[in-house]
Image: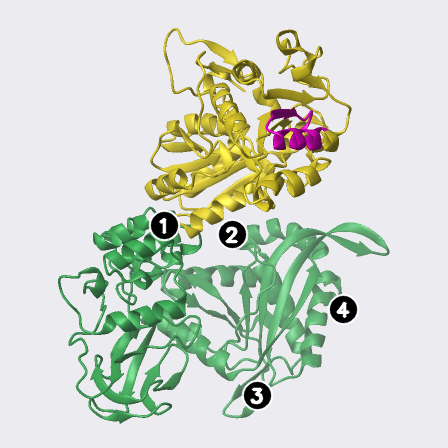
Chain colours: A yellow, B green
């Protein structure tokens, strides 16, 4: 991942550049300073600073009451967070690996997502569940998955997938402020990427896509780490005379359909790229949405999806890469669309 | 709604059909299944039946005219319905009436849309939207995408009149030969470019032709007659020429000293052949007017290639002549034949013929009998070959030889017996002294 590929809307010369992990920590710290009800709970997040060091140093500032180490039980952590949220607290769960969300699934799907509806709006679950996702670290099949489609399927849960440091900060602050449960995915490979992040507090509304690169020939809708692969592909395709527009939805739920539809109406061609397994992945949802939308009559090529192969993520680094869409795959798909293949 | 009557594609190779006759006049009512017209293709004549009921409103082609496959030959519809005056899409016309909205064409739009449904046009949603906006007929637009899919750009090109319509084969041919399709005029339906249009522009070399005359004409007639009349059977064998060639080597200086000519294999064959023929009067025969005549004296015909064509000069009484005499006479006669100074009578009266192609890389061939003779000997080259002798592989100087005989005059067995004797005489020439 090239940090230069990380796009920032603000290109000030003096712009402060920090990593994605630091941006997440900054958002958490700012929220916790401002709102006493915000606290974090998770495994080894205290002195150790969490599996990826995101909360490192926070226990010194906020103390063990608000940076709470928990037993190793994702169901218990999530259930505790839901309970405290119902009482008016604003818990932020750190789930060590997003693969373990399966253990917390009953709490998320049957409790967090349902309670506000079942109580007719009399109770809210204003919690955030932060969790690292994705492959590329050699962590093998049980620590490398991208399961965002699971939670995106449940009405009542919001799903965020930031791709840059500045987006991460603004979106996390919006997620904490949101009265609904929000699943906040942090891609492991993005933690060390750097980008300009304004120091002051700001939020990015959930459900607002970002056009990461403007273009006219083909639209690539990409999420998380694939945003950077798409931008790299766009850079190279420009040399071939193919002008790519890259759209980062940033949140899967709610999805900014209009930005995508407008882009497809402009280019007539679209490729949806995510790291998750293609079969049953959220790309299918985006592709279908486009086909059902006003953009249908503007489609001048089949809607193409790129996603991982339907196999458990291999440990072998070469095979791990081979299962996931790469820059060359994205370039080829774009060429096929533009050259009417 | 008037329906087109198309020239059907009646075979996989059919590109055009010739309209032989109409069974209906313009204005006549037509029933479904009634014969409408008769068509001749490269293979068959067939009656084309009507698929629609109604009035034959229009006939665009007269009898004996050629119509491209899928070309519209007429319309069937209700009385008074409007149909195009000119035949639609005949090559130089505007390729698609719908693509020039300024000239309103009555009716066909509706039918075209039906045709499109039936054909299942592959087009992107964007292309379909554009075609609706421009009233362009998708079924007449050639798609540039995968599997012929029509994209927006194709519709734009068609609307701008830049679309070139061609068959996939024509496109491939054009690419292979660097032919610009936009410069080619199509002869298919609605001006579609077919392969023959692409290959047509190639320059044709001027071909030389001359009337069939002189020796060529005689050869042509005689060969044709013999091939037509005579049931030819050709026997092949190989002869070990080791001893015969040794004999020739020994006789060469002797004969050269005596006659000034070099003894060749041809004369050896004539010498041996004459003696073999005397032993086999069945083979040494001829047939004229249903009479078989057994010959006595051997007059050997010798096929000689000349500038004017094949001539067969005759060496007479070869059974009585020695090798020196044969060498001298053969060389002289052949030279005269090549110079054109040979008197006509020396070109006729042969009783057997030898055709020697041994100077070429020819093994066996099937000579055509020089009528009215019963047989002809075809001589191939002499080549060193592995041969098995007494259970061991040795190198033999093998000559390929073929005997064509007239099966009306003789049967296979006597011909084979002659060939076997001929072979033995050449392989063991000393028996000629017995």
Disc 2, SS: loop
- The quarter holding residue B165 reads bottom left
Q: Is residue A149 visible?
A: no
Do the dots labelled 1 and 4 sit on one chain?
no
Q: Earlier in the sequence, mark 3 or mark 4?
A: 3
Residue in the image at 65% along x and 41% along y: A109
Disc 3, SS: strand
Residue in the image at 65% along x and 67% along y: B272
Front residue of B415 and A229:
A229
Relative to B229, does residue B117 appear above or below in the rendering?
A: above
From the image, tell me which residue sits under label 2.
B260
Q: Position of residue B23 (x, y in %)?
A: 28, 92
- The quarter holding residue A126 reads top right
Alpha carbons under labels 3 and 1: distance apart: 99 Å
From the image, tell me which residue sits under label 1.
A294
From the image, tell me which residue sits under label 4.
B434
Q: Report the magenta residues as a range.
A: A77-97
Alpha carbons under labels 2 and 4: distance apart: 29 Å
Q: Position of residue A323 (x, y in %)?
A: 63, 35
Q: Kindly indicate whether the residue at mark 1 contacts the one at mark 3 (C-beta within 8 angstroms).
A: no
Tell whether position A61 is magenta.
no
Disc 1, SS: helix
């Amino acid at each position: 991942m090239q940090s230069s590929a990380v796009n920032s809307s603000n290109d000030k010369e003096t712009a402060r550049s920090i990593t994605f992990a630091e941006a997440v920590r900054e958002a958490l710290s700012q929220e916790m300073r401002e709102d006493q009800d915000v606290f974090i709970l998770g495994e080894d997040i205290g002195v150790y600073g969490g599996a990826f060091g995101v909360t490192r140093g926070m226990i010194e500032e906020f103390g063990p009451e608000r940076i709470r180490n928990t037993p190793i039980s994702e169901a218990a952590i999530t259930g505790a967070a839901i309970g405290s949220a119902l009482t008016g607290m604003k818990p932020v769960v750190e789930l060590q690996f997003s693969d373990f969300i399966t253990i917390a699934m009953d709490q998320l799907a049957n409790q967090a997502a349902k309670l506000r509806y079942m109580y007719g709006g009399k109770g809210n679950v204003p919690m955030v569940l932060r969790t690292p996702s994705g492959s590329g670290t050699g962590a093998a099949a049980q620590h490398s998955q991208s399961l965002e489609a699971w939670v995106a399927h449940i009405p009542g849960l919001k799903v965020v997938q930031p791709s840059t440091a500045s987006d991460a900060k603004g979106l996390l602050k919006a997620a904490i402020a949101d009265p609904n449960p929000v699943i906040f995915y942090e891609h492991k490979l993005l933690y060390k990427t750097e980008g300009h992040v304004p120091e002051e507090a700001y939020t990015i509304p959930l459900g607002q896509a970002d056009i990461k690169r403007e273009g006219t020939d083909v639209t690539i809708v990409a999420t998380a780490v694939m945003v950077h692969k798409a931008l790299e592909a766009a850079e190279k395709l420009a040399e071939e005379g193919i002008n790519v527009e890259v759209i980062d939805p940033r949140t899967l739920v709610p999805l900014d359909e209009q930005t995508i539809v407008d882009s497809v109406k402009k280019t007539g061609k679209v490729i949806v790229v995510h790291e998750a397994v293609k079969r049953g992945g959220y790309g299918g949802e985006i592709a279908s949405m486009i086909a059902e939308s006003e953009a249908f009559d503007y489609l001048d090529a089949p809607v193409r999806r790129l996603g991982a192969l339907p196999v458990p993520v291999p440990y072998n680094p070469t095979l791990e890469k081979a299962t996931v869409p790469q820059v060359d795959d994205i370039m080829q798909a774009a060429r096929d669309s533009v050259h009417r293949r | 709604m008037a329906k087109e009557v198309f020239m059907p594609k009646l075979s996989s190779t059919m590109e055009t059909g010739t309209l032989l006759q109409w069974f209906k006049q313009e204005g006549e009512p037509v029933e479904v299944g009634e014969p409408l017209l008769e068509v001749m293709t490269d293979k068959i004549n067939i009656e084309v039946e009507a698929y629609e009921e109604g009035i034959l409103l229009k006939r665009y082609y007269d009898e004996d005219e050629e119509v491209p496959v899928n070309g519209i030959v007429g319309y069937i519809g209700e009385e008074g319905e409007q149909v195009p005056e000119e035949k639609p899409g005949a090559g130089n016309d505007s390729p698609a009436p719908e693509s020039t909205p300024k000239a309103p064409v009555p009716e066909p739009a509706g039918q075209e849309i039906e045709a499109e449904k039936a054909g299942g046009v592959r087009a992107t949603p964007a292309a379909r939207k554009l075609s609706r906006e421009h009233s362009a007929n998708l079924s007449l637009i050639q798609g540039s995408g995968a599997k012929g899919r029509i994209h927006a750009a194709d519709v734009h090109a068609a609307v701008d009149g830049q679309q070139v319509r061609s068959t996939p084969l024509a496109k491939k041919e054009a690419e292979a030969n660097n032919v610009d399709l936009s410069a080619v005029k199509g002869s298919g339906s609605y001006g579609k470019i077919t392969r023959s249009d692409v290959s047509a522009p190639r320059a044709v070399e001027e071909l030389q032709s001359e009337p069939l005359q002189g020796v060529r004409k005689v050869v042509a007639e005689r060969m044709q007659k013999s091939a037509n009349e005579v049931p030819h059977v050709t026997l092949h064998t190989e002869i070990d020429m080791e001893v015969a060639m040794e004999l020739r080597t020994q006789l060469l200086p002797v004969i050269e000293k005596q006659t000034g000519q070099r003894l060749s294999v041809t004369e050896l064959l004539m010498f041996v052949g004459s003696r073999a023929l005397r032993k086999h009067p069945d083979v040494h025969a001829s047939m004229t007017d249903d009479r078989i005549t057994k010959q006595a004296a051997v007059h050997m015909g010798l096929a000689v290639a000349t500038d004017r064509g094949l001539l067969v000069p005759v060496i007479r009484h070869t059974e009585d002549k020695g090798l020196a005499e044969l060498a001298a006479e053969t060389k002289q006669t052949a030279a005269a034949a090549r110079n054109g100074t040979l008197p006509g009578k020396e070109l006729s009266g042969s009783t057997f013929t030898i055709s020697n192609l041994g100077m070429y890389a020819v093994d066996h061939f099937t000579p055509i009998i020089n009528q009215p003779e019963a047989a002809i000997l075809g001589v191939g080259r002499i080549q060193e070959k592995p041969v098995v002798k007494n259970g061991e592989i040795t190198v033999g100087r093998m000559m390929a030889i073929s005997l064509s005989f007239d099966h009306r005059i003789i049967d296979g067995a006597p011909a084979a017996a002659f060939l076997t004797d001929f072979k033995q005489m050449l392989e063991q020439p000393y028996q000629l002294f017995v």
